[in-house]
Image (cartoon, rainbow, N blue to C red):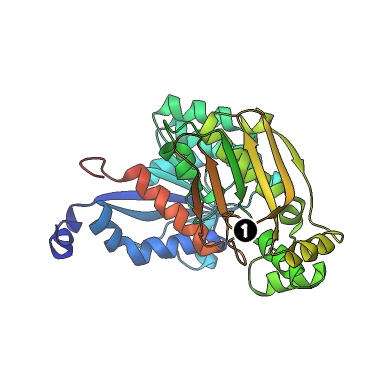
């Protein structure tokens, strides 16, 4: 079918109203993408998502017909999620709230509420996935709804999609990953001779590192992502996974320089294996040419799924940025709502 022919079918696309929780950089980028790319999504995928409500911690708004939220000064008080879902008739609840301990319970409760009502949940928020995985799964089954977490497992990197469906039947036995672009960037700068503080400063200037990069450097963020990938691949409960992490600290510079002198690259590798159930390890490893993790540069990410008979399956790239995370949310929104016929 030609693009011109497909364009004539755009008017038949299924309208999909979305309630968006969180309007920071990721939430804003998500809303902007839907408003900008709605017609293209309709042509290509047969569905046209639109933000029907935006919720922040204490306020919310109902955007206009094209999905553009009004200025914050015009927002009203936040209403219970049940009420907002009833008012909008939304089919999808999107979470772009920070992955903080303070917001974990609210994120979990709202996701459960939506799922039990048959509303699909798409989330980039990690905190409640780590602690309420079983409850979320039970709520989705009870409501006949779906939950998708691509934005929580590597932004634009489609590792979550591979873990969830594409590896079925391939007998994946191991996951080996560099899913945190900040720490890869920092390690490369250390190998070039930077001090740790200079490397962190450079990462912040490029918009790669958060103001507080401790979760990146400690290995906690990489471990979180592999915990979630293992949950998708093998059914592990992330709350029961034990983490053993080796941090990047002031002593790491010497190891990075030594590895570079032998044409190797130091990497913070997060790994899990079916042979060691419920354990994720993050280690500083020297990687050699030919290793997909060695080939990464700057803030790039990669995951290698070890499948003994099918061969290793590797996914790499994917932008680490608010736009990258927003695009993952867009992808998951389309995935849970697009028509499923033919090749689709």
Q: Nearer the viewer, residue 305 or 57?
A: 305
Q: Residue 92's spot in the image, x, y percent?
A: 40, 44
Q: Is residue 252 left or right of residue 336?
A: right
Residue drawn 73% across and 63% down?
262
Residue drawn 67% across and 65% down?
185
Quarter of the rendering containing residue 297:
bottom right
Q: Is residue 322 left or right of residue 278?
A: left
Q: Residue 142's spot in the image, x, y percent?
A: 44, 24
Q: Is residue 319 above or below residue 115?
A: below
Q: Which residue matches tag 1?
A: 294
Q: Nearer the viewer, residue 31 or 293?
A: 293
Q: Is residue 159 left or right of residue 267?
A: left
Q: Residue 206's spot in the image, x, y percent?
A: 64, 73
Q: Nearer the viewer, residue 244 or 118?
A: 244
Quadrant for the C terminus in the image? top left
Q: Is residue 242 visible?
A: yes
Quarter of the rendering containing residue 202:
bottom right
Q: Nearer the viewer, residue 324 or 64?
A: 324
Quarter of the rendering containing residue 134:
top right
- Where disc 1 sits, the SS reads loop
Residue drawn 46% across and 54% down?
328
Q: How many marks?
A: 1
Q: Among all residues in the image, which is located at the extreme front?
A: 262
Quadrant for the N terminus in the image? bottom left
Q: Is residue 146 above or below residue 84?
A: above
Q: Is residue 90 visible?
A: no
């Amino acid at each position: 079918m030609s693009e011109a022919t497909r364009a004539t079918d755009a008017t038949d696309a299924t309208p999909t109203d979305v309630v968006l929780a969180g309007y920071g950089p990721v939430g804003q980028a998500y809303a902007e993408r839907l408003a900008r790319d709605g017609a293209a999504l309709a042509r290509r995928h047969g569905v046209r998502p639109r933000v029907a409500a935006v919720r922040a911690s204490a306020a919310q708004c109902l955007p206009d017909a094209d999905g553009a939220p009004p200025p914050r000064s015009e927002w009203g008080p936040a209403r219970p999620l049940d009420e907002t879902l009833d008012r909008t008739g939304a089919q999808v609840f999107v979470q772009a709230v920070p992955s903080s301990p303070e917001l974990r319970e609210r994120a979990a409760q709202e996701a459960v509420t939506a799922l039990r009502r048959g509303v699909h949940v798409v989330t980039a928020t990690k905190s409640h996935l780590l602690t309420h995985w079983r409850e979320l799964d039970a709520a989705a089954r009870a409501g006949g709804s779906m939950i998708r977490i691509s934005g929580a497992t590597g932004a634009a990197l489609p590792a979550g999609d591979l873990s969830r469906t594409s590896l079925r039947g391939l007998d994946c036995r191991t996951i080996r990953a560099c899913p945190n672009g900040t720490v890869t960037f920092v390690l490369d700068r250390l190998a070039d001779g930077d001090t740790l503080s200079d490397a962190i400063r450079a990462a912040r200037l490029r918009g790669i590192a958060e103001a507080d990069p401790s979760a990146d450097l400690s290995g906690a963020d990489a471990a979180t992502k592999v915990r979630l990938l293992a949950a998708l691949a093998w059914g592990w409960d992330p709350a029961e996974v034990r983490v053993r992490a080796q941090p990047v600290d002031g002593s790491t510079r010497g190891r990075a320089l030594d590895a570079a002198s032998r044409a190797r690259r130091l990497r913070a590798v997060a790994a899990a294996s079916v042979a060691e159930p419920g354990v994720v390890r993050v280690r500083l490893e020297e990687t050699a040419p030919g290793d997909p993790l060695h080939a990464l540069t700057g803030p790039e990410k990669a995951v290698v799924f070890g499948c003994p008979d099918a061969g290793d399956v590797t996914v790499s790239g994917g932008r680490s940025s608010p736009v990258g995370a927003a695009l993952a949310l867009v992808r998951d929104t389309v995935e849970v709502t697009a028509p499923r016929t033919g090749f689709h």
